[in-house]
Image (spheres, rainbow, N blue to C red):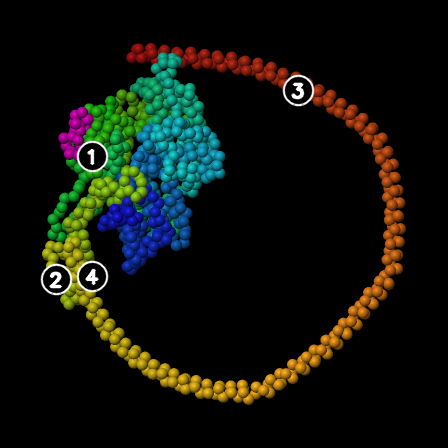
Amino acid sequence: MRRYEAGSIYTFNGAILIAVNPFQRLQLYTEEILESYYNDGLLRSQGIEGKRLAPHVYTIADAAYRDMATAILGGAAAQGGASQSVLISGESGAGKTETTKIVMRYLTVVGKGGDGSNAVIMEKVLQSNPILEAFGNARTVRNDNSSRFGKFIELKFDDRGAMRGAAVDTYLLEKIRLPRHAAGERNFHVFYQLHATTIAKAETSGAAAAAASVGGDKWHLAADCGSHYAYANQGGVCELATMDDGEEFAKTVKALGLIGVDGAMVARCFDLAAALLHLGDVQFDFDVGDDGGGSAVSGDSAAELAEAAALAALDEAALVKALTTRLVKTRSEEYVVRLVPKDAASARDALAKALYGRLFEWLVVEINRGISAEDDGTFAVAASIGVLDIFGFECFAVNSFEQLCINYTNETLQQQFNRYVFKLEQEEYAREAIAWSFIEFPDNQDCLDLIEGGRKVTPPEGGLLAMLDDECRLPRGSDANYAARVGKSLLKTSKRIAASKKQVVDGVFEVKHYAGPVPYVVDGFLEKNKDELPAAALLLFEAARGETQGALIGAICDARDAAAAAALRDESASTSKKPPPGSLAAAPRGAASKKATVTVGSQFKSQLASLMRAVSATKPHYVRCLKPNDDNVPDAFWRVRVAEQLRYGGVLEAVRVARSGFPVRMPHAEFLRHYRPLGAAFASKLDGRAACEALIAVAAANAGFAADQAQLGKTKVFLRKHAHDALETDRAAARRAAAVKCQAATRRALSAGDVLRKLAAARVLAAFGRVALALKRLAAARRTRAATRLQACLFRGAMPRRALRRVRRGVAATQGLYRGARGRAVAVAARAEHAAERLQAWARAEPLRRLRFATVARVVAAQARARARLARAALGRLKRDRADVGRLRGEAEAMKAEIVRLQEDARRQAFEREAAAAEAAAVEVARLAAELEASKQAREREVKDREAKHRLDADAA
């Protein structure tokens, strides 16, 4: 708690890093801090003890990288033993997603090649995070950025430790959130990012520019999210203080472009997301036509349906049919059943979930294509580091199939943690032949057996998931039957499940997980486990129109959809043909499928087993994320909540095991080297195990601890905490005694040197003294000689010097008077000469001035006469031109009249042509209307005849 209040959110429990979410931005991830941990790891990998740094998530990331690099250099990569994994766990809101991004950032930085050739792939790996968060994360009551799916990111490195690519595996996207989410929560972030672009249209923001680049003007989204779009406003939260949806949208668009998704497909992705928003607002009413037993799109939501169909590139009529009807097949025929409004709304939600789920899967495929490690011959992937970010343990007021799968995942991860921390601990003691009494630790294998089936589950049906799959295969399987089977079979065979008779009737059972009991409500278990898409929707996907717009629908619909749609088309052509086994729509209504389809539970179980195999093949590094409080506020540490998380996360048990066992272990050579000061007299004479035995015996006798506090294994020496502390105390005392001896010898050597230095200094001081006395005598002699010179200069030569100065002053005054008189005379003569020169110049210039004035007067008169002649000529020309202007004005008026007449003729002719064309068009429209009416009446007669035939066949059957 004190560490948290001081801003230290990381600490180590053995090899497990504990990370407490601070709920605020801390300056712990700067470039300088990252570089310091990188340098420290580099020094430690070279066997050099660097500066002791505080615990940090960088420490775990660097340990994984250094272990991988060491194994590669040691040749372990050839046997597949160099790969590492970083397993990040914790409950929702504990900071797993942010920790994952920090680990990935560190690994991409340290995995940068020396030549920078992998800079592009590193940037793509980091840019996958905004995409996955936009389409897979949402706000929950516990976390503003909660991952609603699990992901395992495998970073791949070459034999030089440079990152060359990555791969992303995702697990169990929470598609049920799309049509329904609880109060105080939001749907997936991408929908609110789209809405943010409507607010930013009038602004010069990144969101507006990004929306324009993907054609956002055709989404036609309302600016008020709170009163529109049922898929976005159920939780009552549209904006988050901790997130700018507009900026996040710009990042998502940029990231999609950087990983290599085509620009047209990027636009189609957001078009489909906007289409789902419109589709969620489509409502249904009872159809009053015909028999009135079906449903029709309400008039108020017809525009929303049209928008959804246009944006998703689906035929509007086919979409209405897929939402309001269900295709039912028997052995001899197939017919269409009209759905009531409630079932039509369920079909709408099922279609939306299917589209969004397939869109998410397609995005993951595109991400993997963009970040894959393509071997071009210049490198080969030598090892990898996997980073697991998966949903934390969940327990809500109502827990359904999603929570069962999520908690099943956490049970599996906890079992892997138990195996690594506890079981491997005991296995190492047994392998080293250590006399140690095994202690009990929490083992949740029986809970895993309950969920997935195993040796401890005696019923032939297996565990919860296997029984659910069996119920899904039954013709009339239901949630109530599943709850009854669970209550009948598993309550008697497993202590991990409990339910009263009333709970069994209500469809509720409680599983006792390692983190605590969780009650599950089976309502909807079968539907969620099947995750079937209506047959009409499969045909709808096939009918997606437009080569460009429909390309996305074709891309996101997988091979199962294509096979099922093909089977439906074949059955429509010939109802006697049986559907291919395994297709999504192969099972007739009321009969079980010939071949079991792949359910969500079985598929997830297979994915989880594959994930555990991948993790088991690596060396794991654990990060336990803790949530300090449930209010998601900084500087609030709830001790009880943190202790609870430490307890069910296995951290406290790991501490207990470490304290009760031998937490300190050293190889024989390291033990001898470390504790040699305690037995230096004989340790050098013995080797290996014998030297360790002798050293342990002497150390135990001197330190006073029992013999069972230290155990000698086959390759290591194991010490309990008390023995290790005692040995360290004795080792410190021995080192202090040795240090005292070293200090005494050093002081003796320093003293001898000090005496020599003092003698030398005395000699130097004596020399300085002699020099000082000599300098003193020299200064006295200099002063005597200076006084003699001063007396000679001041007293004996003073009078002659004064007389000489008086003579010099008189001579200078006389010379000044003479020079002044002579200069004044010269100046007067010069001024008189200058005045005479000016008078002479004026007299010489007077005739010239008079000549100039006379010439100017004659030139002016000549110019006046010339201008007068030019003016009279111009006046004559103007008089002649005035007569011509009158004639031209008359001709212009005549031409204007002719133009007006021609325009009138043209308008009259155009009017006559338009009247003739309108009359012809009216005749053609009347003819087409008559033909359309006839065709409509023929179709109505055909439909009525077909319905009558069906009723007759049904009566006959």
* Amino acid type, mark 3: Ala
Residue 819 circle label: none
497 part of magenta stretch: yes
* Amino acid type, mark 4: His
Which is in the foreground here, disc 4 or disc 3?
A: 4
* Amino acid type, mark 1: Pro
- Secondary element under disc 1, as helix, strand or loop, is strand
Using the rendered image of the protein, determine whether residue 517 is visible from the camera's viewpoint. Answer: yes
Earlier in the chain: of badge 1 and badge 4, it is 1
Earlier in the chain: of badge 3 and badge 1, it is 1
292 part of magenta stretch: no
Earlier in the chain: of badge 4 and badge 3, it is 4
Question: What residue is at 19 percent from the left and 28 percent from the top?
Answer: 486
- Secondary element under disc 2, as helix, strand or loop, is helix
The image quadrant of residue 413 is top left
| Residue receiving disc 1 | 517
Which is in the foreground here, disc 2 or disc 3?
A: 2
* Amino acid type, mark 2: Asn
Question: What residue is at 18 percent from the left and 45 percent from the top?
Answer: 653
Q: Which residues are magenta?
A: 483-504
